[in-house]
Amino acid sequence: MSVEVLNVGPGVTVQDMGRPGLLAEGVSRGGAADRLALAEGAALLAQPVGAALEMAGMGGRFRMGRATRVALTGAPMQASVDGAALRWNASHLLPEGAVLEIGGATRGVYGYVTFGGGLDVPEVLGAQSAHLAAGIGRALAVGDRLALGEDRGAATGMGLEVNDRFGGGTLRVLPSLQTEVFPEAIRARFCAETFRRDTRGNRMGVRLLPPGEGYGLEAGGRILSEVITPGDIQIPGDGAPYVLLAECQTTGGYPRIGTVIPADLPRVTQAGPGVELRFRFVTRDEALAAERGMRAEIAALPGRVQPLVRDPRDMNLLAHDLVCGVTDGEVMR
């Protein structure tokens, strides 16, 4: 059984947690731009984290080849099945032959569809995800059919309240190898200014627009290329910062003023054009505490899943105003 692609946006790919450990071979980790959204989808379906459809900005139309459980997570998008609206951050049971239609993002950038049983697509270098920059896989096209794995679960009609990461905000940053190359005045201005996410950006990285002059360095051209990772903030010749994301290259020579910690990367990936972002340097201990907090949050996701429709037996009815507008029965004349 499979999912048939009837119509699709230009940035829809299969993504999982990526390919860690291959930097020496010239392949960056890749995987989902918002890895937290994958964990949320898995929690809603009560299954392990696996591959899902990642949709950049807009989705498409997909026909179910069997009765299929789906979870919708990440950037909220307009979603419906056979014309009936579907709730985001929730799981749904779609009948065989149903057409799932997903439109544009109302906030954020990357939305995800996770399928009950996962996607049964071949692995390349230990992962199912497309890595467009490395030439692994491709974006989906009309007529594609994606095989579904065996679904041993049954939970559906579940919802999840998620932390807002779609409106920008302050990003915690660790010093990088070239942080001290930037004069103190520039570093202070970097933390004091508010940036806007540029329209230029993809799975490799996003460009941020400073409110005034850029952060270029005369010494930038004398820095040797070295290993880089997602979260690094490169400053190219035009002085506008680039925050590197999942499909960034493995080496680079632009100076890095800092590195966004992993716990805050979802705020970068889900910042749409024009969204405001700020930076704040933190210590290694603060970064490690944030990492522990993020892992604890992911581990707690299954326990936060709740039915969309609550059983009245589980409700304290005395706490609800069940009847309003009651009168003494006198007819008003």
Image (cartoon, grey):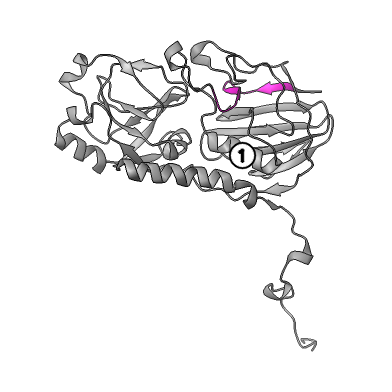
Which portion, as a residue range, is magenta?
Answer: 4-18
Quadrant of the image containing the N terminus: top right
In-image side of 274 versus 174 (left or right): right
Give percent across and percent down for residue 71.
68, 38
**Residue matched to label 1:** 73
**Residue 77 appears in the figure:** no
**Residue at point 51% right, 29% down?**
33
- Please say whether residue 5 is one of the residues in the magenta stretch: yes
In-image side of 277 versus 256 (left or right): right
Q: Amino acid at mark 1?
A: Thr
Q: Is residue 32 above or below residue 121?
A: below
Based on the displayed image, in which of its 4 quarters is residue 111 positioned? top right
Give percent across and percent down for residue 270.
48, 36
Instruction: Looking at the picture, tell me which residue is in the foreground, 47 or 100.
Output: 47
**Residue at point 57% right, 37% down?**
37
Give percent across and percent down for residue 82.
78, 35
Quadrant of the image containing the C terminus: bottom right
**Residue at point 18% right, 34% down?**
186
Is the residue marked by circle 1 packed among few (<14), some (14-19), or many (20+) residues within 10 Å?
A: many
